[in-house]
Image (cartoon, grey):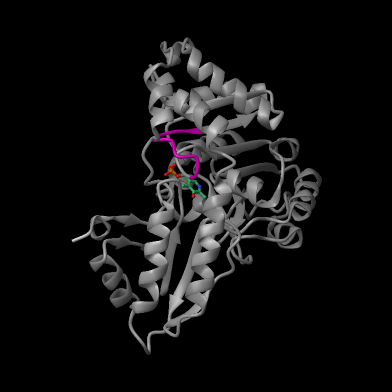
Amino acid sequence: MTLELKMKINLISDTVTKPTPGMMEAMMTAEVGDDVFKEDPSVNELEHKVATMFGMQSALFFPSGTMTNQTAIKLHTQPGEQLICDKYAHVFNYEGGGVSFNSGVSCRLVDGDRGMMTAKQVEAAINPPDFYHSPLSTLVCIENTTNKGGGACWDFKELEKIKSVCDNHQLGYHLDGARLWNALVAKGENALQYGNLFDTISVCLSKGLGCPVGSVLVGSEEMIKKAIRVRKVLGGGMRQAGFLAAAATYALDNQLERLAEDHLKAKEIGVLLSSLPFIKKVESIETNIVIFEIDESFLTSEEFTNKLLQKDIHIISMGQGKLRMVTHLDYTNEMHDRLLSILPTL
Ligand SMILES: *Cc1c(COP(=O)(O)O)cnc(C)c1O
């Protein structure tokens, strides 16, 4: 018996990571206070740091990415209005119907490519503002990288074109940047470009960056002042949250650039999968998400997932026959070698 046989490989999401020793140390030694009174120095430091990275006036720490997006949507809309997003958008598919629950807003879904719309499609989705029979369009939500779209990165030029559409039609412009860090690293982009373009941006710290908890919303001082009230209403005001914020500051300083390793591993998995006879299709891989389909004349997706499970390798189904693997901080070189050696034997 080798130790190797006991190695659990968890590729269901990049949210499964646990704090690294350095991050633990930063958390244990964090200076904290009551953040509901804005008296937590570690939270204040993180908020200042993220606002500065994006060149935005202000930032606010949240317990989850869902709450960050939901708060932003609440700030940009009134009940009865409509936001425009891709049919794959997290805000539409995976936030429990919060768009209607929290804001009383509907979603106009655009049939984009891998979760990405064109400026033309966005413009065509806007309801004429004086046609009072339709909901008033007031917000465009973008997702970068796209989750359901397989970690795809937007062409920044298209985002600029959509910004012009928003300006011409007085629409808010929100970025769900849960995995924006991955796009920045993959495309050599800068957070400032994004801060310059969007009204509000949400980023997750609990995914590729490896924090146990946390997201941040950035925007103007006025927006963030309103966001504090919405966060309170949603129950997201936290007390000594500095222990969590310290993890985030540590991650931004030490675990951002390494995302390139996750991207490389995802690409290597994709290359191998493409060469296997029982794989029907692998979607193109730009960051840390691998989405693929099994050729069911060989075996079903369920059989494939179960075979992996027998080897203690965990992956997830995205529905419609699509399977997903996500690489991350806790997916080591050793695990990677093991996965690459097992896949061809299934
Ligand atoms: C994970 C994710 C979120 C937020 O999810 P939480 O689990 O609430 O932190 C938002 N948008 C996208 C695209 C995501 O992948």
Query: Residue 74: x and y, percent?
Result: 54, 36
Q: Is residue 149 visible?
A: no
Against 85, residue 232 (above or below) is above
Against 71, residue 173 (above or below) is below
Against 330, residue 339 (above or below) is below
Left/right placement of residue 127 relative to residue 343 reads right
State the residue at coordinates (51%, 59%). 265
State the residue at coordinates (38%, 27%). 24
State the residue at coordinates (42%, 32%). 63
Quadrant of the frame with the N terminus = bottom left
Nearer-the-camera pick, 60 or 70: 60
Left/right placement of residue 204 relative to residue 17 reads right
Nearer-the-camera pick, 139 or 182: 182
Q: Residue furthest front?
A: 1
Query: Residue 331: x and y, percent?
Result: 41, 52
Nearer-the-camera pick, 198 or 206: 206
Number of marks present in the image shown:
0
Magenta residues span 208-215
- Majority secondary structure of magenta residues: loop
| Residue 292 lies in the magenta stretch | no
Left/right placement of residue 115 relative to residue 305 reads right
Query: Residue 322: x and y, percent?
Result: 43, 71
